[in-house]
Amino acid sequence: MNTATMEHCDVLIIGTGPAGLAAALAAAPSGAAIVMVDDNPAPGGQIWRDGPGVKLPPGAVERRAALARHANVHILSGTRLVAVPQPQQVLLEDATHGWRLQYATCIVCTGARELLLPFPGWTLPGVTGAGGLQALIKGGLPVRGERIVVAGSGPLLLAVAATAQAAGAQVLRVAEQAPLRAVAAFAAALWRWPAKAVQGLGLLHPGYRTSSHVLSVAGQDRVESVRLRQGAHTVDIACERVACGFGLVPNTHIGQALGCALNDQHAIAVDAWQATSVPGHYAAGECTGFGGSEKALVQGAIAGHAAVGQRAQAQALWPERQRWEAFAAHLHSHFALQPQLKTLATPDTIVCRCEDVTQGQLAACQSWTEAKLHTRCGMGACQGRVCGAATQNLWGWTPPVPRMPITPTRIGTLAKPESGPVQP
């Protein structure tokens, strides 16, 4: 596993989460020159994020070790893709310099991010996404002794609660917005995926409540309490931290910059080979629709085999992919967001945190473009990654295709990127 910067490769893999790792391991035996790019400090993505005190699951450790045995796989951690200057070429940047990389084939494995819906108090210090809190704890955030409320939707809430408790926090409540009948139906069918059933049993929490969602968070300089809707009642809970996430949104901005079309679920559209609408470009994992690490792993392996022409090996994995796609469909149908979540924000609730744009300012707009022109919504540092997904959920707006550069970038990288190999 070489970390030297390269100027060309056979296969470029963007993202080193489960899908990216599986794609690299599938393609590596072919001998193709493979470059993996990720802005995290170590491979693993969000689900296998490393950090102080983190004990990675055996599958993550084994895949890292397996990749290290392939000299033709080059992992560039702490590296961002910032632009697509021309077809089959990307502009990369790390902590010291920027350079262009030419590739023959690309596999997009950019994962997903949390859907954060605005509600009164969501910008107070101490309020994070559910997965965001999990990542912070893995990165060393001290939460011992803190009272925490986890709210939102999906099985991730229970995993976050377990991570927080293991770090010494007191998780007072896990508020799931889905109704009991939906959660019960989801659990009743988990016999089809025994490993998921076992995992779920190990994460059960006494403070878990269905038909429950956040209404507001109160506090002066930081979180002091949270107000929840519990069925027909309202409950106030004193706490120091609130972690709230309403599911996931596929990270498609890099795929779109490469020209890949999206499907009706706002994810990167792929065919049976994980191929996108752009020849020579594949996609795998949660950027094609979320459904867990198992689905991402098998999709990544199919894409990796297909990218190096191993169609028989790729096709042999189709039944396994179908199995985990069925789980994803089961998950989505039972944790669909309830309509009342669209009414959490009040007119003075900030929706775009970068530019301090409120719900009242946006309510008069008819589209994302109109909102940008009149309020600067989405023109801040995150470039609409947070408020874009929120407004899409609230009003059905479709954010435009990302413009270059994709992320904040040094002027030197844009003005004069390196053109040749740079040794570490």
Image: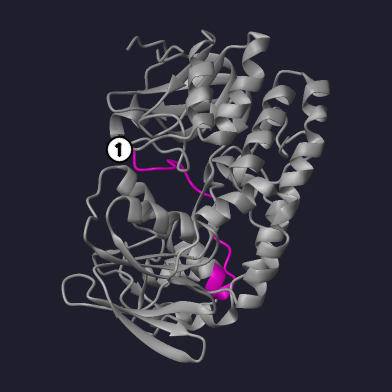
Q: Is residue 379 above or below residue 58?
A: below
Q: Which residue is mark 1?
A: 53
| Residue occupying the point 64% across, 56% down | 266
Q: Is residue 83 above or below residue 312?
A: below
| Residue 229 x/y as whole percent | 45, 84
| Residue occupying the point 39% across, 29% down | 42
| Residue 170 x/y as whole percent | 30, 63
| Residue 148 x/y as whole percent | 31, 66
Nearer to me, 174 or 126: 174
Residue 72 occupies which quadrant of the picture? top right
Considering the whole magenta stretch, tell me its main secondary structure: loop
Q: Which residues are magenta?
A: 393-409
| Residue occupying the point 30% across, 42% down | 139
In reply to whether residue 406 is colored magenta, the answer given is yes
| Residue 417 x/y as whole percent | 37, 23
Q: In the shown orientation, is residue 316 left or right of residue 93?
A: right
Looking at the figure, which quarter contains the C terminus? top left
- How is the protein colored in the picture? one colour
Q: In the shown orientation, is residue 32 left or right of residue 381?
A: right
In reply to whether residue 413 is colored magenta, the answer given is no
- Residue 272 appears in the rendering: no
The residue type indicated by label 1 comes to Gly
Q: In the shown orientation, is residue 375 left or right of residue 69?
A: left
- Residue 93 appears in the rendering: yes
